Amino acid sequence: MNVHKNDNVIVIAGNARGKSGKILKIFRENHRVIVEGVNIIKRHTRASQKNPQGGIVQKEAPINASNVMVVCPKCNKPSRVGHKSVSDSATGRKHTMRICRNCEEMF
């Protein structure tokens, strides 16, 4: 999966197309993500100690990860994500970094 938690993404397909937000949670086994302020559903909840009033609660529902695209922090455009192998000069270890396919910026 090319998206990580706290990435800024834009929705490219579905009812919420064009909306953007931050990724709050990732479900890797289902290939789904929860994006802040996107795909809001209403849930009828029973009164409990945590929520003594009960009633109708609005919350975000998961959407498929293929329907979101990462927004590059440098060029502020939705872009495909590439991977580049970079070696650390201090330790000599190799790391895989994500790069923007538009401007080649690492993030």
Image (cartoon, helix red, strand yellow):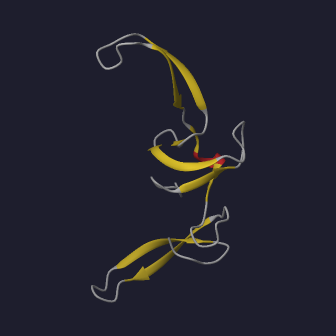
Whole-percent x and y of residue 100?
Answer: 60, 71
Quick check: 54 left or right of 67?
left
In this view, 41 is above or below 87: above
Above or below, comparing residue 88 to residue 27 in the picture: below
Say if residue 27 shows up in the picture: no
Q: Position of residue 61 (x, y in %)?
A: 54, 32
Given residues 21 and 14, the one toward you in this image is 21
Callout count:
0
Residue in view at x 37 percent, y 10 percent: 47
x and y, in percent, of residue 44 in the image: 50, 14
**Image: 83 above or below 48:** below
Q: What residue is shown at x 34% (from left), y 13% (from top)?
A: 52
Work out which residue is located at the far front of the displayed protein and give it: 53
In the displayed structure, does residue 92 sit left or right of residue 100?
left
Q: Residue at x 46, y 78 (%)?
A: 85
Residue at image point 59% right, 31% down: 40
Q: Specify the quadrant of the image occupied by residue 49.
A: top left
**Nearest the camera: 5 or 49?**
49
- Which image quarter: residue 82? bottom right
Place of residue 76 in the rendered image (x, y in percent of width and height, measured from the top left) = 64, 66
Residue 82 in view here = yes
* Residue found at the very far top of the displayed protein: 46
